[in-house]
Amino acid sequence: MSDMITADLVDLDLSADTKQAATRALAERMVALGRVTDLEGFLADVAAREAQMPTGLDGGIGIPHCRSGHVTEPTLAFGRSTAGVDFGAADGPADLIFLIAAPAGADDAHLTILSSLARRLMNAGFTAALRSLGEPAAAAALIRGEEPTPAADTGEDSTEDVVEDTTEETADTGAVSAAASAEAAPGSTGEDSGGPGRPFRIVAVTSCPTGIAHTYMAAESLEHAGREAGVEVVVETQGSAGFTRLDPAVIAAADGVILAHDVAVREKGRFAGKPTVDTGVKAAINRPGELIGEVRDKAARGEVTSASPGATPVERGGESGEGYGTKLRKWLMSGVSYMVPFVAAGGLLIALGFAIGGYEINKAPSVMDHFVWTQADSWAALLFQIGGVAFAFLVPVLAGYIAYGMADRPGLVPGFVGGSIALTINAGFLGGLAAGLISGAVVLAIQRVPIPKALRGIMPVVVIPLVSAAVVGFLMFVVIGKPIASAQSGMTDWLNGLSGANAVLLGALLGLMMCFDLGGPVNKVAYTFATAGIAVASPSDSAMKIMAAVMAAGMVPPLAMALATTVRGRLFNAAERENGKAAWVLGASFISEGAIPFAAADPLRVIPSSMVGGAVTGALSMAFGATLRAPHGGIFVVPLIGNPLLYLVAVAAGVCVTTALVIVLKGLRKTVPPAAAQGPGGGADPSSRAPGAKQAVAA
């Protein structure tokens, strides 16, 4: 560390009263030595890192840091403040402030040295010495580890010892072990420890967004707390310099897991089936003893958790503070997101089968028994039957991945089983929704039951699938399956009975939903409602009309935005005009998300206009009796649409309505241009607006 900090980078009388001023004062010293090339750019990078998570630590320490392209070499500056500077720590301002600057491409050796400093900050003797030194050169030497730190009365190891230990450990592997040689503390033997005569064992992972400071400070804090409690703690630091995986044998022998992280834990599935505490990295720095006690309590109760090997589409339990309604929506959207590709593939294959072989193709024999390579009907039958197989997965996939969103991998087995049962008893999509929610709830309930240590290893692969599948199967077959099947049948009969004004009103409602959030939850509810009706071998005429209305309305917003940017481009900025070109293709392909850039920039005008146009299109499509067997495709499946010309008229009408409304509403925006800047039609001409004239103000 000899070249990282010198006396010129130390300020023992830092007078700044804010963290921005303190950071700037220390950064200016780096600029003066040529370590930082662009002061403002570097400070912006520091501020961006600070915005992710405050860098103040309990004990009066502030450690702002970042990786930046404006840093020429790894550098550390130190400032000591008498008044203290607020860096967001829970216990108040920091008087010891370390500014760490790492180049964007810092090598592993330098990052390892910085990580060793982060560990030393957890040593009370080290920080006490920094508060007492009177010379910048002495402080720089101490930080470099050139002089020992008196242990005083703290009972801590000297800084020199700590430096040797931490540098050696981090430089070799990045996975640091703090094996306690002391005997287990009271309560750490027997069932709590996993066996008599040895201490309780914990494996931990620490990681933070930058991976320079907090990652290693959390590791050091956990290890020190483990030594005090007579607990073996082995830490894997997932820092900027990479990480070395914990030995699988160490993980297997562990009695508990602590995951202290602010970014995703890599290869999290390694820790499945063990008592786990999952928290932020600062918790491991500030209250490691509590975390160790918490994981020991969980082990004593037999609580285990299942870690996911990869990211799921939703957080299992949602973010802390989320209401049940928010969590429920996320769980349902998890199932829908996995189901949609099956809908698209199966529906398009079935539609192609009908297009080639006619609507009698559903009566063709199995292609296993009869397939003639030169006959179009055989190919049509093949496409239709493949699509039918894909459609058969819809309800099980929906149920399985709703349960997956709730309980992760253990929810898949009961979810798929429950979804298949829903098909068997004709409970349809309503049955699939119920099966998914019940499966997730059953798995979560099982995971809360205290389990003997001997059974924990087989819980994820044997016990949970067995018990949950049996419970869900019983409920679906015997308890709730029949009422749900009756409800599904009633809904189908209601749809088949829609005609006249009722059908038109339903089309308008679905059009409003499709255009409300442009691919969001409300849009997906309408889309799922439509695809549920055609996800059978022989869908009703009403179901196909609903599918046609939904797809037509979904095409309106992006096509309308494309048309508006073409006919009245001056109302849009250059980026929106470019997005308008792409929106032609996206809208024609039934990708409603093509209008999102416009809605995000001007939601009060674009979204209501889109909803009106979508309602017009949906109502007209239903009134015209247009039908659609394919769940996707836009204009590319027009040949498969019943009454295709009138269908296109419905789409065109909605596009024109939305375009006109957007142009009118944008034209009504209040402007305050100079008189000379009026265009030929009396409106403000952006190209002639005088410098400094106020831009249009959104209502």
Image (cartoon, helix red, strand yellow):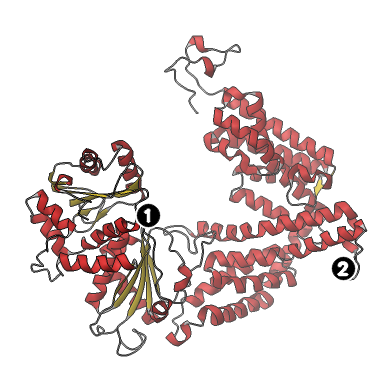
Q: Is residue 194 above or below residue 487?
A: below
Q: Which residue is mark 1?
A: 209
Looking at the rendered image, the disc whose residue lies closer to the viewer, 1 or 2, is: 1
The answer to whether residue 641 shows anywhere in this view is no
Specify which label sits upstream in the sequence, 1 or 2.
1
Query: What residue is drawn where x is 83% and y is 48%?
Result: 640
Residue nearest the viewer, comparing 434 with 197: 197
**Callout 2 secondary element:** loop
Q: 541 left or right of 339?
A: right
Q: 277 left or right of 537?
A: left
Dot 2, how many residues are within 10 Å of its Cα: few (below 14), some (14-19), or many (20+)? Answer: few
Dot 1, how many residues are within 10 Å of its Cα: few (below 14), some (14-19), or many (20+)? Answer: some
Instruction: Please state the horizontal and vertical placement of residue 253, each as a whole percent of the image.
Output: 39, 81
Q: Which residue is mark 2?
A: 366
Query: What residue is drawn where x is 34% and y is 70%?
Result: 235
Quote the CA–CA distance across marks 1 and 2: 56 Å
Outermost residue to the bottom: 196
Instruction: Please state the horizontal and vertical placement of residue 245, each as a whole percent of the image.
Output: 41, 69
Which quadrant is home to the N terminus? bottom left
Marker disc for residue 420:
none
Q: Is residue 614 above or below residue 698?
A: below
User: Decide: marks 1, 2 in contact (CB < 8 A)?
Assistant: no
The answer to whether residue 623 shows anywhere in this view is yes
Q: Is residue 510 above or below residue 334?
A: above
Write down the quadrant of residue 400 in the picture: bottom right
**Which amino acid type is shown beneath numbered disc 1?**
Pro
Q: 197 left or right of 615?
A: left
**Which amino acid type is shown beneath numbered disc 2?**
Ser
Instruction: Please state the horizontal and vertical placement of residue 228, each as a whole percent of the image.
Output: 22, 75
Instruction: Please state the horizontal and vertical placement of residue 150, each as a whole percent of the image.
Output: 9, 65
